[in-house]
Amino acid sequence: MSHSPALLKTAVLQATKTHGDESQAEFSEVSSLSSEPIISNNNNSSNGSNDMITTTIDSSTTTTVLSEGPTVEKTQSTSTTIAESQTTSAHQVHKKRRLLFKARMSKFDISNPETSSDPFRGFFTLFWLVMAFYVIQTAIRCYEQEGVILSLGFFRLFSKDGLALLVSDMTMVATTMCSVVFSKMLMLGIIHYETTGWVIQHVCQTVFLFFNIYWTFWRDWPWVQSGFFTLHTIVMMMKMHSYTAFNGELSIKYRRLKSLKEYIPKWIAEHKDDHADDDNDYNKELEGMESEVSFLQDELIQGNARYPDNITFANYFDYLLVPSLVYSMEYPRTEKPWYVFEKTVATLGSFLLLYITTERYILPKLYDPNTSDLRVSIELLLPFMTNYLLIFYIIFECILNGFAEISRFADRNFYDDWWNSITYDEFARKWNKPVHHWLLRHVYAQSIESYRLSKANATFVTFLFSSCLHELVLVIVTRRIRMYLFVLQMLQLPLIMIGRHPLIRKYSMVGNIVFWLSMFVGLPLLAILYCREAFWSDAIFGTHIHSQ
């Protein structure tokens, strides 16, 4: 059954409002969320090069001419209606920009050429030497006081019900495989993403999230297990969303392409007589449809990958291993995994430091009701900052790089120099780039495209969404609704505005000092607000750690 090209064209153009693509204008202006160029329209940009490449925006655009239908991309904030476009001879349609992955190394990677030439590399070495002596000193003190080198109370806590946690986590990850089946149904046209597909997607994601939350409560895990399982559930939900949204948008273009290929021969046959009468109009309309076919074919190709050949369980499993929350049909790859063992050793060593700091210097203070909150805050300043830095290093340098090695993922730019941040928006976009990219693509840009929000409102929605997820984790960990973290995160919005004051911009060191002071004070303050009440009631801790 043939369709009118105007109606079919409208369907694919509406797909540009779906998850997965962002225009250059919608990304480059986001100073509060991203000041870096992170998108490109070059589908062949993914490669296996291991060179240090700075991400850039490709200034070239692929343009096609359509004889009718609304324009894909608005120009100077004006849109062309269907009626107007039918009287217009041609419209320029720019290929949408996508997140660009390129081969880069992380900043703390010892094999990074930039690290070997960094004038501050000696401080990095000094830090780990200090940490080594810190472990030795703590072990000696622990042996003198308790007769053991290392207390195992905290270990018994987070290893409790370990087998059930492992099985639950593997099952949770396995259930995300349904995204492949769903994407295949979208491609076949059994479900249309632009109508019911996106509704089904969000319903399934909501059920997935809250069922796993219910499972966490039902198992009554301690706070470590609850926090890990909840965070991993949120990560898997983000991956599912990006995978389905990306393939859902391409399914619309794929079906549009098939319809055009079926329609054009019929259209040519029907207009054979018109060809002789009005050769100019005939050629224009035919060229317009052929140009759209070429445009859609380019949209379905990324590097050496082509839609729908990417919709396989093998491709999805590879995506699960890739340390990125944003799906792409093809990622830049390294030749072979080189240093998985090195990252494993670094993870274990850093975790030992984290364990000692938590066991010896944090938990006893949080659990002691006889110590005032002010005294606890002061005594936890350094331990909490140490733990924060260790957790950052374990996750973003060790674990993500480890998965990058296993999957041969070449883009290791998981963080930027957030320690030099002057404002909170700079910190938000630098310290956790995988989540930042996901929020930028699937929350911020989508709020503007689909819901027509202003830039300021889209920024507010993005912060609101992020704050709700952070608070959700703490609600599950502490079994209490307190909203402290939510309020503090939302307060970053006015702090961002203050940080843009010319005085702060002029004296960047002042901004950096304020940033670090807030980090030093904020972490122990949150620990006191959330943990002490819960620990005293034994709601999440079970029994006193030192009595185990």
Image (spheres, rainbow, N blue to C red):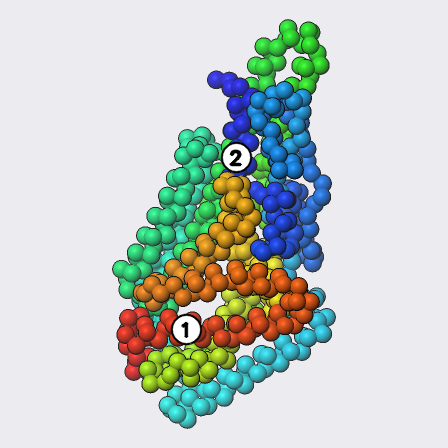
Residue type at mark 1 is Ala
Give the quarter of the image for residue 149. Answer: bottom left
The residue wearing badge 2 is 15
Q: Position of residue 203 (x, y in %)?
A: 37, 43
Viewer can see residue 109: no
- Dot 1 falls on a residue whose secondary structure is helix
What's the CA distance linking mark 2 and mark 1? 45 Å
The residue wearing badge 1 is 527
Q: Is residue 370 placed above or below 316 in the rendered structure?
A: below
Q: Which of the numbered marks, if any, corresponds to residue 536?
A: none
- Dot 2 falls on a residue whose secondary structure is helix
Q: Position of residue 532 (x, y in %)?
A: 35, 75
Nearer to us in this view, 398 or 78: 78
Pick the quarter of the image with the C terminus: bottom left
Q: Position of residue 506 (x, y in %)?
A: 69, 67
Name the residue at 38% across, 72% down: 529
Q: Is residue 366 placed above or below 435 in the rendered structure?
A: below
- Residue 366 horizontal side relative to residue 413, left or right: left
